[in-house]
Image (cartoon, coloured by chain):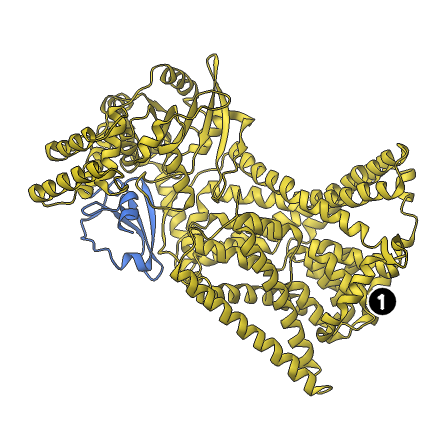
Amino acid sequence: MLQRLAMLGIRRGIGIRVVHGPGKRGAILQVGGARIALGWDVIQHIEVERLGIDPHGTGEPS
Amino acid sequence: MSACHTEHRKIQSAENIPVIALAGNPNCGKTTLFNLLTGAHQHVGNWPGVTVEQRSGTTQLRARKASVMDLPGIYSLLGGGGEDQTVARDFLLNGRVDLIVNIVDASNLERHLVLTAELLETGRPMILVLNMVDEAEARGLDVLTTALSHSLGLPVVPMVARTGKGRRDLLETLAQALETPPRGTPPTYGPLLECALDALAASMPGGSPGYRRCAALRLLEGHVDPADAAIKQVLHQVTTDMERHGGEMPADLIMDRRFDWAREGAASALRHNGRAGMRQRITDLLDHVVLNDWLGVPVFLLTLYLIFVVSFSGGNIFLDFFDQASAALLIHGVGHVLLEAGLPPWLVSMVAGGAGGGLNLVISFIPPIGLTFLFLALLDDSGYMARAAYAMDRLMRRLGLPGNALVPMIIGFGCNVPAIMGSRIIEDPRGRLLTVLMQPFMSCSARLTIYMAFAVVFFRSNGGQVVFALYVLGIIVALLTAWLLGKTALPGEALPFVMELPPYRLPSVRSVLLQSWQRLKVFLFRVGRVIAAIGVVLFILPGVGWTDHGLQNTDINHSLLAQGSRALVPIFEPMGIRADNWPAVSGLIAGAAAKEIVIGTLNGIYQRQNAADLMANYRDPDIAGQLWSAVNTIPANALTFVTTLNDPLGLSAMGSVSAIEQSSGAERATLRAIASGFTTLSAFAYLVFVLLYVPCASTMGALRREVGWGWMGFSLCYGVCLAWGASTVIYQTGTFVEHPASSAACIAGVLVAFAALVLGLRIHGRRRARSPEPGLFRGAAI
């Protein structure tokens, strides 16, 4: 799973934008130009740190 | 030893033309580019043992032809993903490839360049297509192609493949690259790793430096085992040295470096101009609605409802045209020509009535199935399907199914064949298998004709509710089947939901039409053959019978159909079919081929139509008149479509006998015969049997193609046994007071058999867990 997430661009230290959720369904993350849907059981294992508002909506940390 | 070395052995193609492989992440536009390059020359490939689609085609590059392979999308050469990704990886590493065209999404460049790094490391000639530059610009990014080309050491072609922008440059670059193969500049890994790579590469015999480096990388990443003891020793040595000096695993160091390399490459090629475009705002708005906690599921169901209505009600506009026109040409026309040519009547009947009739049946499916494929392709192209899967995931996961399993289920209400083929959207093999095995229980539109004929006779005042109950029963049985199999024979959980959501796009007409045609072609040519063959058999059975003088032409009452049906009647007696009602059994036998012909078979038997002059239709057919009549059905059906938009199941026809006759195709005499042959209870049991047993030969053919002979056989036996068991329990429960002892014995027998089935499935599941098969779909092919 870690490899799969890494291949989708979700790696340790990467900047993401939460488009939808997190909730019982899971969450939609924007990573770079891509939106990744993650189920509830996957997001349980991901820890994030709030960085602020992304001015360009690109998923890059502001 | 390694994939790279195997690759070194070039396999000479029979045509000896260069092979160009399109490689890239899923949703980067490979197929669009493939269609752009190959035009109408592509065909669906048939690779043994795998359940993925591959397309190959040819393109003209200056004065030479080149073969273009459209491979399934992959995220990495290292592993992960479904069977389709495995095949793509194997082809890129081991197949004969003269040039890789790596397609990357400019709006998501950093992630796509990670695969580029791996492809560069294979040492194969390569160019980069920077696709979707319009979407990158819409995100407020300026694309610096020259900088990227310099950074990668590769020709880079900026493109918008969907509109064809950049095609000329691409063709020119491809021609040049085949003459002077560019190899690019793969990532470097720092002194420690480079030293290890050099040592490993030096220990390998043969191969170019590029191949040896590629093999060394794969060894260090732990994706292949060294076959040679000397290489194994070097590998152990360098790994130990690296861990002692760096403290990190080589595989982690390599992956980190590739990501850094990709980030640097993307940073050199893209500049933020600070103007986030309108497309981003539209995406945000649409996602806000379709992913909303409350609106997500209703929006999805509404979308499917619309597809269902337009595909099957809209398909009906042209269904009669296809049906009547093909009947005029293939049955009456061919029959006339053969008769005129002096062929014996039995041969004319077999070819025109049997094979022609079978083809006529397949052709009449074209409008609804073609429209279904068209709308599925539209949904695929729009980017909504992945979001719908996310919206439904939580609900379906409770049954052990992935979220997108609901899509084929809904399609199954129209026809089970596209539903089974539509299950390919499910990535997880177990989830896909469960979803495929559910489809035969979804009430297709063909079953509706039978429901209606019986409903008008036995359930006049509440026919709509009975038909609706049958639809609901089908859904319940389908879901319970998936749940049961998931708990016994196919234990496991649905894979954690991880899916990239493609950007919203206006579907490309060309791409959608090509995709739909590819799928329809498979249906027509593969499934059509099965139906045509069965048509011949069904045509022979009512016309010949076993007599004292051997096999002879007989009337229908002494035909093989009647003899066989009478022999089978005792099996169906526990579900309420009386000994003299053998035509009901004949209907079920015919229905195993196609539910559309059940009522037609009953019509033929009850009215002794088969005793009529079969050659009458062939002697002097009015082909032109029949074709004109077929054309005239289009406006009439269009009007019906408009007036019944709010009734996609056609239940409004329950209101009158004439409407029922028209909808089901049953004649009044047939309805009267049905009334005398059944009781209300036995009629309902019969309908339950019709719902649950073999849907049709086409569905079985589609099942075999998607999941192999074994699971198709299971589905067939399971469906027939379940249908018989459920119908018997219904009938025996309803008549329990009349013969309590025999009813109790029947019901107990069914329950014991079901318990035995569950036990058998559980044992099978445990055996599988101990010695898992290499794949779930043995014998399946695309």
Categorize mark 1 by other alpha carbons within 10 Å: few (<14), some (14-19), many (20+): few
Rendering colour (chain B): yellow
Position of residue A40 in the picture relative to residue B782 (left or right): left
Tell which residue pokes out farthest to the top in this image: B63
Position of residue B80 in the picture relative to residue B551 (left or right): left
Query: Residue B686 falls in which quadrant of the image?
Result: bottom right
Residue at position x 90%, y 43% in the image:
B615
* Numbered-mark total: 1
Residue A19 in the image: state x and y as whole percent.
31, 50
Viewer-closest of B316 and B71: B71
Residue at position x 41%, y 22% in the image:
B166
Query: Residue B20 falls in which quadrant of the image?
Result: top left
Residue B545's place in the image compared with B57, above or below, is below
Viewer-closest of B270 and B447: B447
Residue B691 in the image: state x and y as whole percent.
65, 63
Viewer-closest of B324 and B388: B324
Position of residue B390 in the picture relative to residue B691 (left or right): left
Judging from the image, mark 1 belongs to the subunit labelled B
Residue B676 in the image: state x and y as whole percent.
84, 71
Residue B652's place in the image compared with B284, above or below, is below
- Identified by mark 1, the residue type is Arg
Residue B722's place in the image compared with B592, above or below, is below
Can residue B270 be seen here? The reply is no
**Image quadrant for the N terminus of chain B?**
top left
Q: Badge 1 is on which residue? A: B672
Tell which residue pokes out farthest to the left in this image: B245
Rendering colour (chain A): blue
Residue at position x 44%, y 29% in the image:
B33
Can residue B339 be seen here? The reply is yes
Residue B594 in the image: state x and y as whole percent.
70, 53
